[in-house]
Image (tube, grey):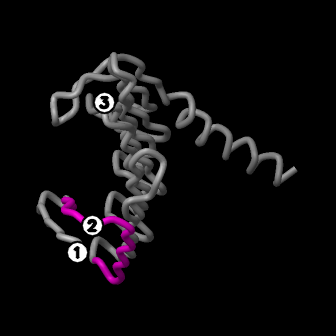
Amino acid sequence: MRNLILLFGFLLIVTPLFAQLKVFKGTAKDEFDIVGNLIYTYYEKNGDIIKEGDFSFSKTIADGSSFSLKGKFKNNKRNGMWNFLLINKQSVGTFILKVDASYSDGIPDGLWQAIRTANGKQVYSIKMTLKKGNVIGFNLETVKQGNFDIIYYGYLLNASLK
């Protein structure tokens, strides 16, 4: 009987939390003025929108190039694995950049990996291990010479491979 009362009490407390989640589906513009499809779950608290759960933003343009960003929010902060995919179709070929980034409570934490391909062949792979936003390990593998840019927290790092 005691367990039944505890279960009932738990359900009374938890059920409203799940019932408050709403889904936004529409178009939006990101900080780079890219307009695309946006879907995320959220709840409202004191008039503020708090993202909670799945998030996705995607855009496809006429030439078949596309951009997508997927991940999860917890209490309005990025949490868990986030995936970024950019497919750039040009007359000289298709270029793909895929980034997997791990977050904990809105802070980069864990393994981050970026892979760049050109016409189906890997150009470079970058792996970083982060702990509470600080880089504690870094590995770059490349199979092609040239220049490329890395943007980390708004800082532009240019690397030249010879």
SS for dot 3:
loop
Q: Label 2: which residue?
A: 145
Seen at 44% across and 58% down, the residue is 122
Number of other residues with Cα within 10 Å of mark 3, as a class: few under 14, some 14 to 19, many 20 or more: few
Seen at 23% across and 72% down, the residue is 161
Q: Amino acid at mark 3?
A: Ser
Distance of label 3 from label 1 (alpha carbons): 26 Å
Depicted 94 relative to depicted 114: above or below? above
SS for dot 1:
loop
The circle on residue 162 is 1
SS for dot 2:
loop
Of the pair 127 and 101, the residue shown nearer to us = 127
Magenta span: chief secondary structure: strand
Q: Is residue 109 magenta?
A: no
Q: Amino acid at mark 2?
A: Gln
Which quadrant does the C terminus fall into?
A: bottom left
Q: Are marks 2 and 3 in contact (CB under 8 Å)?
A: no
**Residue 52 at x, y percent in the picture:** 44, 40
Q: Are marks 2 and 1 in contact (CB under 8 Å)?
A: yes
Query: Sequence order check: which comes first, mark 3 or mark 1?
Result: 3
**Residue 2 at x, y percent in the picture:** 82, 54
The circle on residue 91 is 3
Tell me where the magenta segment starts and ends, as one range.
135-150
Disc tally is 3
